[in-house]
Amino acid sequence: QERLKNMISEEKRKSHPKPLGVEVKPKPQIAERGQMAAESAAEGGTDKEDKSEGHVSEEQLLHIERLQKLLRDTELKARTMTLKESALNEEIDGLKRSLARAESGAIEYKKNVFVRYMENVSEQDSLLPVIATIFKLSPQEVERIKQKRAASGGFFSLNFL
């Protein structure tokens, strides 16, 4: 998690505003606006600022800056989510490996208990509760095993192998 935090802070440092690539026309003073409005009216136009190619009004500039900030924030969030996803996938892989190792050890333990049960008639009485726990045998199943062993006189222990 500490590595993830470091990666996120690194991405934040890399994120910086990009140049607009357009020329910003300064806002004219009040007297100049009046003169511009008069000239525009004489030409049959309106009192709005000249919107010739390459010039952007202050309102448009603010809108562009808001959109650029939104884009930077969204890109940063996307990179952060990608980093978190990578970290979570690494954690999942580690947990899968741990589970596989645990299952492998559990299977090995079960096998060893079962082999001891089958090989040693003298240990069968003491190993039956262990076997019942490992295989989640019901009390009825345990009782049936005990009855079969008692009725067979030891033959059920499979010593004939």
Image (tube, rainbow, N blue to C red):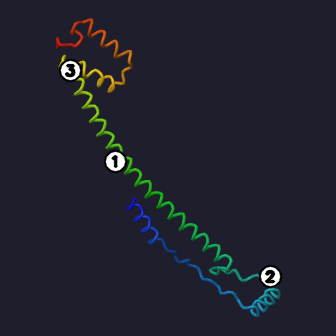
Asked which secondary structure carries label 1, the reply is helix
The amino acid beneath tag 3 is Glu
Image: 131 above or below 153: below
Asked which secondary structure carries label 2, the reply is loop
* Picture disc at residue 46: 2
Task: Using the numbered discs, state the Cα–Cα distance from disc 1 to disc 2 in whole angstroms.
Answer: 68 Å
How many numbered marks have been drawn onto this rendered protein structure? 3
Of residues 135 and 101, which is closer to you in this image? 135
Camera-near label (1 vs 2) is 1
Q: In the figure, is residue 15 to the left or right of 95?
A: right
Task: Using the numbered discs, state the Cα–Cα distance from disc 2 to disc 3 in whole angstroms.
Answer: 105 Å
- Residue 102 position within the rendered picture, expressed as x and y whole percent measured from the top left: 30, 38
Image: 122 above or below 36: above
Mark 2 crowd level (few <14, some 14–19, many ≥20, 10 Å Cα): some
Q: Are marks 3 and 1 in contact (CB under 8 Å)?
A: no
Task: Using the numbered discs, state the Cα–Cα distance from disc 3 to disc 1 in whole angstroms.
Answer: 39 Å
Measuring 76% from the left and 91% from the top, which residue is drawn there? 30
Asked which secondary structure carries label 3, the reply is helix
**Precedes in sequence: disc 3 or disc 1:** 1
Of residues 156 and 86, which is closer to you in this image? 156
- Residue 10 position within the rendered picture, expressed as x and y whole percent measured from the top left: 42, 68
Image quarter (top left, top right, bottom left or bottom right) of the N terminus:
bottom left
Q: Disc 1 designates what residue?
A: 94
Mark 3 crowd level (few <14, some 14–19, many ≥20, 10 Å Cα): few
Camera-near label (2 vs 3) is 3
Q: Disc 3 designates what residue?
A: 123
